[in-house]
Image (cartoon, rainbow, N blue to C red):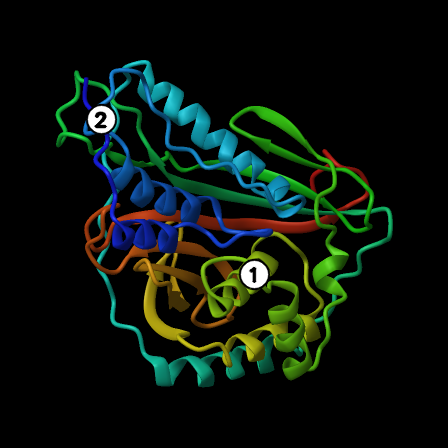
């Protein structure tokens, strides 16, 4: 019988560094998978005979609910891979150079444009509806029938699929998600007003974001960047709040401009991006002319234990936003 090797103090310290900090981490699903993969590759046996699923469930009380459908989709895909269906490794995309000096002027220009757009009112009992296409990275279970390096599970990008979400405007109301033909309630989910009521002064807003995300993620700057990304992804923001978020993002260290990116619907746009300590870059993609938010893309910018540089870890595309009186309704 094989046993895991004894770890010295330096190795234990390195493993501790790889783990998320204690408290209330609000990491995206893909980031949890990256962390867990690096951890398991160092402490697990070279091979195991029982199926192993590398899926990290977030313990955060409310943000995890918003990610629940994504995790369910990952689980479904992992089960399909476990049943023997064919799958492919995650696509490799070109790693574009990031322009640190270009990010701030772009975000200021975007803030000026979005700040002039008319506000879409959302009633207290109404719901914000978002339809999108999404796919996240999954780690397939071990299967001796598939060729792979010993001890390394292949990583695959889940198939791009439709996602609909109904976010309540008010705290206490239950939202709804429809994804992969299934429906999930969003009990205790963040209401749309959580983002809509943010300060419109960029300096005040950024201080609040850092305070609200203290102890989350793998760094303070990364947690702040991810918070803004979540606000852009599945909410309906007042124009002045959106403008303040863009100006606040420009002040976060490590934010760069990427001149060309592609969302899950195949649309090209300009991107605002940041790379974390683990080599994963997250891009917010915008239409280069109107600056409308298109979606997100995440990929590795260097070779890691998770995959080669360019390995796509997530892709999304927002297709429709609107306001409806009841969850389950679609905009007319």
Toward the right, the furthest residue is 124
Q: Is residue 252 left or right of residue 298?
A: right
Q: Is residue 168 above or below residue 245?
A: above
Image mark count: 2
Crowd around label 2: few <14 · some 14–19 · many ≥20 (10 Å): few
Quarter of the image with the N terminus in it = top left
Quarter of the image with the C terminus in it = top right
Crowd around label 1: few <14 · some 14–19 · many ≥20 (10 Å): some
Nearest the eye: 287 or 206:
206
Q: Is residue 216 left or right of residue 157?
A: right
Nearest the eye: 67 or 287:
67
Nearest the eye: 176 or 261:
176
Q: Position of residue 191 (x, y in %)?
A: 74, 51
Q: Is residue 110 above or below residue 286?
A: below
Q: CA distance from mark 2 to mark 1?
A: 34 Å
Q: Residue at x 19, y 50 (%)?
A: 308
Q: Is residue 231 left or right of residue 122?
A: left
Q: Are marks 2 and 1 in contact (CB under 8 Å)?
A: no
Please, what secondary structure does the residue beneath circle 2 have? loop
The answer to which of marks 2 and 1 sits earlier in the sequence is: 2
Q: Which residue is mark 1?
A: 215
Q: Residue at x 73, y 58 (%)?
A: 194
Q: Is residue 323 visible?
A: yes
Nearest the eye: 307 or 185:
307
Q: Is residue 88 above or below residue 285?
A: above
> Which label is found at residue 3?
2
């Amino acid at each position: 019988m094989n046993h895991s090797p004894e770890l010295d103090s330096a190795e234990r310290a390195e493993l501790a560094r790889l783990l998320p900090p204690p408290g209330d981490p609000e990491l995206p699903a893909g980031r949890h998978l990256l962390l867990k993969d690096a951890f398991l590759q160092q402490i697990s046996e070279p091979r195991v005979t029982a199926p192993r699923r590398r899926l990290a469930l977030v313990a955060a009380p409310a943000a995890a609910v918003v990610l629940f459908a994504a995790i369910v989709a990952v689980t479904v895909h992992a089960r399909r891979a476990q049943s023997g269906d064919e799958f492919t490794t995650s696509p490799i995309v070109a790693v574009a150079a990031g322009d640190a000096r270009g990010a701030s002027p772009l975000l200021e220009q975007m803030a000026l444009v979005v700040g002039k757009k008319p506000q879409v009112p959302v009633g207290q009992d109404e719901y914000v509806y978002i339809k999108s296409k999404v796919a996240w990275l999954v780690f397939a279970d071990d299967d001796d029938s598939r060729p792979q390096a010993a001890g390394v599970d292949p990583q695959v990008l889940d198939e791009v699929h439709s996602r609909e979400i109904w976010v309540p405007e008010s705290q206490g109301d239950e939202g709804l998600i429809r994804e992969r033909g299934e429906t999930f309630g969003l009990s205790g989910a963040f209401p749309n007003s959580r983002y809509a009521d943010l300060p419109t002064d960029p300096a005040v807003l950024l201080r609040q974001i850092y305070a609200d995300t203290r102890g989350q993620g793998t760094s303070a700057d990364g947690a702040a960047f991810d918070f803004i990304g979540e606000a852009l992804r599945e909410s309906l923001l007042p124009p002045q709040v959106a403008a303040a978020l863009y100006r606040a993002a420009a002040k976060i260290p490590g934010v760069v401009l990427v001149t060309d990116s592609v969302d899950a619907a195949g649309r090209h746009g300009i991107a605002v991006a940041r790379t974390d300590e683990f080599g994963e870059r997250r891009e917010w993609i915008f239409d280069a002319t109107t600056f409308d938010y298109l979606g997100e893309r995440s990929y590795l910018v260097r070779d890691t234990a998770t995959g080669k540089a360019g390995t796509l870890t997530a892709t999304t595309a927002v297709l429709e936003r609107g306001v409806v009186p009841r969850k389950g309704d679609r905009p007319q």
